[in-house]
Image (cartoon, helix red, strand yellow):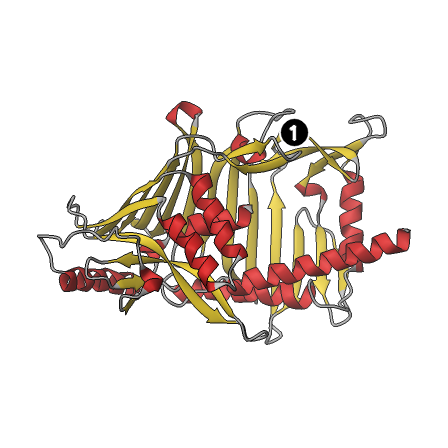
Amino acid sequence: MIHRINKCMILLSCAMMMVMPSCSSDDDNNSNNGTEPEQPKGMTVEEQKAKLDNVAKLMRDNFKTEEINDATNLLAHALNNYFAADGYNLEALDAKYNIGLYNCSDPTLGNFGGYFLQLPMFNGKLAATKEGWEVTGESDALELSFPDENGVQCTFMIKGSKDYYRYDNKSEFNGMPCVYAIPKQAEGTLTRGGTQVATMIINPVMKSEGGQGAIFGNDVTGTMKWRSTSYDIIIEKKDASGGQGCEINTTLKQGALNAIRSALTTEKQLFAYDTTVADSIVVAPNNPATLHVDVLAKVVADGTISDLKTFTDYLNDASQNDTNEQAFKAALEKANGCLNIGVYYDGSDERMANVILMAVAERDQTTGKEVWDAQPVISFSDGTSYMFTNIFGNISFDNIKDAIANCNKRIEKMKNEYMSVRR
């Protein structure tokens, strides 16, 4: 459930970040439940669209989309070929994982011991060969080397600081008590042929040391920075409303320029325990939120989500019915009923249009069935909509999503095979 929620929040937060929208005629796919703004007095609809086109062109001319595509394509290649592929030998990775787990064992944590999980314990150099992974040396980080599709050597390095927060939320792993060492800084670096492709730096801040009622997602704040050659994406999570709420800020920077800024602010913390299901964490109910997205101080989306849990529940209903057009659109219409997000130009308080979600169908190449998805659009008073197909027009994270899904299938298969041997 949580990954669907994150996707929807990202879609809404990035709606104004997506370049080169396409104009579509009015039909039942882009209905916004009668919430079209009245004809604005200051600009005609055509002038509004021209303004959006100009801002989109500024972003498109300055934003290096190929840098994100390069990194995601490279990671997807590694996952699909060296982790998820059936028959590819993962014994060296499994052995390194078990050694790290052994090094994290702590006999003081329970009657039979437990684990104090620390990222620096899972270290060493490994390389992907034609036959499988093999250990190639020592390191104070985890360094995974692999050839890209052209045979150029690449490395993905994950490193955690030795300074950490001790976080105990009474979890168990393999039936044993498990305490986390949350590093005060974690860094992932992707290189190709010795040249850096991307870097991600995470600096978490733990609000407490956990406890029986602690919820990990609420107890951690901090920042995450994604850096490529041309720009930084900075995500910050902090408390709001005296600690009762949560604020998530995202900034895309090109040098000193804040090209895009967004803020999602909630009245409550994001997560809560579901008392009807043991150890189940859900989005906190009765949690209104505000959303503000600013593009070059020229176009702003600003408004409210009446309740995050209701909104995400409707989106989950839509996702579960993504091959049923009628059911998908019915759920999406309810989700749009939770949104009240307007579009404004150049600091004016005159509402020009609305941000809503529109049902879009793609045909599954394997099954031939139509699969429905929700895409953010700007809906104008004349019934037309601007649909944002991907971040900045030509970026797709589907390759990473599919690669991770393939890895999960491989892991699940290995786990089932292991359990059958034990039985």
**Rendered image quadrant of residue 118:** top right
**Rendered image quadrant of residue 377:** bottom left
The answer to whether residue 179 is visible is yes
- Judged left or right of residue 45, residue 312 is right
- As rendered, which of 347 and 342 lies closer to the eye? 342
Q: Which amino acid, by three-letter code, is at mark 1?
A: Asn
Q: Residue at x 40, y 38 (%)?
A: 307
- As rendered, which of 89 and 316 lies closer to the eye? 316
Vertical relation: 222 (above or below) 50: above
Residue at the farthest front position: 326
Q: Residue at x 80, y 53 (%)?
A: 95
- As rendered, which of 34 and 210 lies closer to the eye? 34
Vertical relation: 201 (above or below) 324: above
Vertical relation: 37 (above or below) 132: above
- The spot of residue 309 in percent (x, y) is 46, 40
- Judged left or right of residue 34, residue 100 is right
**Rendered image quadrant of residue 416:** bottom right
- As rendered, which of 263 and 258 lies closer to the eye? 263
The answer to whether residue 205 is visible is no
Q: Residue at x 50, y 51 (%)?
A: 317
Q: Residues within 10 Å of mark 1 (few under 14, many from 20)?
A: some
- The spot of residue 315 in percent (x, y) is 46, 50
Vertical relation: 209 (above or below) 382: above
| Residue holding disc 1 | 169
Mark 1 element type: strand
Q: Residue at x 35, y 63 (%)?
A: 29
- The spot of residue 398 in percent (x, y) is 51, 63
- Judged left or right of residue 131, residue 294 is left
